[in-house]
Image (cartoon, rainbow, N blue to C red):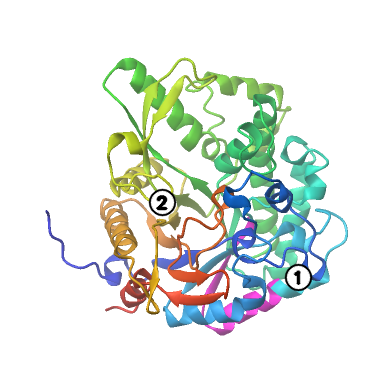
C-alpha cells in the first residue's frame, strides 16, 4: 500500500475555508415552537411508512435550544466556518406574508453567537424544507414559487445580510426535485415527469432570482450548491458509455449549466427537450447568474449500464453491493478519487470563479463505548478525500474550501436516525454530545497538529 506523509492544513493555503455543514430541518427540532409553520418535511414524516422506522424530526438534535452548546463544540474543535440553513417556515410560517419575529430573533441569536465565538456564518436559504402552505398551492410546480422565493430571499438579506459574509441559495436541487417531485420518495411525495420538469425549471429560475436579491441587498459573496456524482460506464460497450453520459447529464449538468449561461443540456438528454413547454420567452436569459462560488457536494461514484426498460433515461445503476466494494451505511461506495474527478470536471467550466466543497462525509455504524467513539473508517474517509482535494488544487483547480457533512449526528431524511454522519455523536434520548475520534482528528488537523 502506498504510504503518504500526514496531511498538513498549510498545504491548502492560508485563505482556504475549513468548516462543517448542517441543515435546519435535520438538526433544529422545535418543529412548531415560537410560531414556526409546518414544512413539507413535517407533513411527509408524519405519514406512516415514509421514513425508516417512522422516525421524525420534531426534536432531532434540538439545535434550536442547544445551539450555544454546539457553537461551543465548534470552538473546541477549532472549526472556523459553520454552514447552516434558514428555515423558510420559521421565518414565514405561511411561506409568504407575515414575518415571524421570533423566527428572525432566533437566527439573530445564532448568527451573533457564532460571530462572538470567532466563527464565520455561512447561510443557506433553502435546504429542502418548503413551507407546507406553499406546497398546498403547488409548491415548486407553481411558477409563482419564483416570486415566493425571491421575496423570502429579500427578507433574509435585509435582516441578516449585515452579518452573513457567505450565502448559498439552494442545496442540491437535483436531489430534492428528483426524489420529491419525480420519484416521490422524499417530501412532498409527488411523482411524474410533468411535476419534475416544472420543478426543475422553477427551482433553477428561483436560484438565479434569489441570488440577484442577495447580491443587490448585501455585501456577502453569493454561491449555490449542487450534488455531483462521478459517473463511469459499466463496460466499454457503446450502449453503456452512452447511458453513463445521459446519467451524468441528468445528475451533474442539468441544474448548473443553465445557471452558468449554457442553457439546459438537452442535446445530451433528449427528455429535457420537454422542458421547453414550461419555459416562457426571456426565461433563458433570466436563468444565468455570475456566482462568486459554486458549492460541490460529492460523496461517491456510480457505475452505470444501459437498460432500455428504464423510462426517459435508458440506464440503471450497478449497485455497490453487487460490485463487492467497501460501502458506507448509506450503501455508497467509498471511492475517494470520485471527489477529484468531480473537481476536475467543474474546473473545466470557464465561468466558475471559485469552487467550495460544501459537503463531504460518511455514515458508518458508530458505537459509544466508555464515553468514546472510535470511528477510524470515517477519519480515513475524510483524510483520503482531502488528499483528492489537494491533488485537484495542486493541478490548478480553483478549489478553496472544504466542509465536512456534518457536525452532529442528525435526522437523515428518509433514512431517519440510522445513518450517523456526525463528527460528534448524539444520544437522541438524552441529547448528550460526544466528539468522535474523527472529530478529534479534524480538530487536531485544523489546529496544525
Tell me: residue 62, above or below residue 225: below
Does dot 2 land on a helix, a strand or a loop?
loop
The answer to whether residue 46 shows anywhere in this view is yes
Neighbourhood count class around disc 2 (C-alpha, 10 Å): few under 14, some 14–19, many 20 upward: some
Tell me: residue 92, above or below residue 52: below
- The reply to whether the magenta stretch includes residue 324 is no
The answer to whether residue 79 shows anywhere in this view is no
Question: In the image, is 128 to the left or to the right of 425?
Answer: right
Pointer 2 residue: 329
Residue 104 badge = 1
Does dot 1 land on a helix, a strand or a loop?
helix
Q: Which residues are magenta?
A: 107-125
Residue at x 20% of width, y 68% of height: 6
Give me the C-alpha separation between circle 1 and circle 2.
36 Å
Residue at x 80% of width, y 46% of height: 134
Neighbourhood count class around disc 1 (C-alpha, 10 Å): few under 14, some 14–19, many 20 upward: some
Q: Nearer the viewer, mark 1 or mark 2?
A: 2
Q: Nearer the viewer, residue 409 or 116?
A: 409
Q: Residue furthest bottom?
A: 116
Q: Nearer the viewer, residue 372 or 357?
A: 372
- The reply to whether the magenta stretch includes residue 108 is yes
The percent coordinates of residue 125 (x first, y second) are: 65, 57
Residue at x 52% of width, y 27% of height: 265
Amino acid at each position: 500500500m502506498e504510504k503518504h506523509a500526514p496531511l498538513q492544513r498549510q498545504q491548502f493555503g492560508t485563505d482556504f475555508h475549513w468548516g462543517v455543514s448542517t441543515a435546519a430541518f435535520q438538526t433544529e427540532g422545535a418543529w412548531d415552537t415560537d410560531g414556526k409553520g409546518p414544512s413539507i418535511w413535517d407533513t411527509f414524516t408524519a405519514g406512516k411508512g415514509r421514513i425508516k422506522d417512522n422516525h421524525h424530526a420534531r426534536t432531532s438534535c434540538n439545535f434550536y435550544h442547544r445551539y450555544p452548546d454546539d457553537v461551543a463544540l465548534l470552538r473546541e474543535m477549532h472549526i472556523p466556518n459553520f454552514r447552516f440553513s434558514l428555515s423558510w417556515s420559521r421565518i414565514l410560517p405561511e411561506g409568504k406574508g407575515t414575518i415571524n419575529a421570533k423566527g428572525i430573533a432566533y437566527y439573530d441569536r445564532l448568527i451573533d453567537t457564532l460571530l462572538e465565538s470567532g466563527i464565520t456564518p455561512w447561510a443557506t436559504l433553502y435546504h429542502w424544507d418548503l413551507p407546507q402552505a406553499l406546497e398546498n398551492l403547488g409548491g415548486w410546480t407553481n411558477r409563482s414559487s419564483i416570486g415566493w422565493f425571491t421575496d423570502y430571499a429579500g427578507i433574509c438579506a435585509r435582516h441578516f445580510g449585515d452579518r452573513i459574509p457567505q450565502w448559498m441559495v439552494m442545496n442540491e436541487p437535483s436531489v430534492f426535485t428528483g426524489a420529491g417531485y419525480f420519484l416521490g420518495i422524499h417530501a412532498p411525495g409527488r411523482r411524474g415527469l410533468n411535476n419534475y420538469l416544472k420543478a426543475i425549471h422553477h427551482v433553477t429560475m428561483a436560484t438565479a432570482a434569489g441570488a440577484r436579491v442577495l447580491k443587490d441587498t448585501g455585501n456577502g459573496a453569493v454561491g449555490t450548491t449542487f450534488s455531483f456524482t462521478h459517473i463511469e460506464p459499466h463496460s466499454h460497450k457503446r450502449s453503456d458509455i452512452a447511458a453513463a453520459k445521459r446519467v451524468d447529464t441528468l445528475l451533474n449538468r442539468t441544474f448548473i449549466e443553465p445557471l452558468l449561461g449554457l442553457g439546459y443540456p438537452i442535446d445530451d438528454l433528449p427528455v429535457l427537450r420537454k422542458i421547453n413547454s414550461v419555459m416562457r420567452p426571456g426565461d433563458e436569459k433570466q436563468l444565468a447568474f455570475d456566482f462568486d462560488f459554486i458549492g460541490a457536494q460529492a460523496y461517491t461514484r456510480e457505475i452505470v449500464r444501459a437498460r432500455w426498460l428504464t423510462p426517459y433515461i435508458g440506464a440503471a445503476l450497478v449497485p455497490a453491493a453487487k460490485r463487492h466494494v467497501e460501502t458506507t451505511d448509506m450503501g455508497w461506495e467509498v471511492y475517494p478519487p470520485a471527489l477529484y474527478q468531480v473537481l476536475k470536471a467543474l474546473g473545466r467550466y470557464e465561468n466558475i470563479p471559485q469552487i467550495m466543497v460544501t459537503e463531504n462525509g460518511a455514515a458508518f455504524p458508530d458505537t459509544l463505548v466508555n464515553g468514546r467513539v472510535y470511528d477510524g473508517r470515517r477519519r480515513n474517509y475524510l483524510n483520503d478525500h482531502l488528499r483528492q482535494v489537494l491533488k485537484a488544487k495542486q493541478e490548478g483547480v480553483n478549489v478553496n474550501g472544504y466542509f465536512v457533512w456534518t457536525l452532529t449526528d442528525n435526522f437523515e431524511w428518509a433514512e431517519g436516525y440510522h445513518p450517523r454522519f456526525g463528527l460528534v455523536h448524539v444520544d437522541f434520548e438524552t441529547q448528550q454530545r460526544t466528539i468522535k475520534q474523527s472529530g478529534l482528528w479534524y480538530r487536531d488537523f485544523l489546529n496544525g497538529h
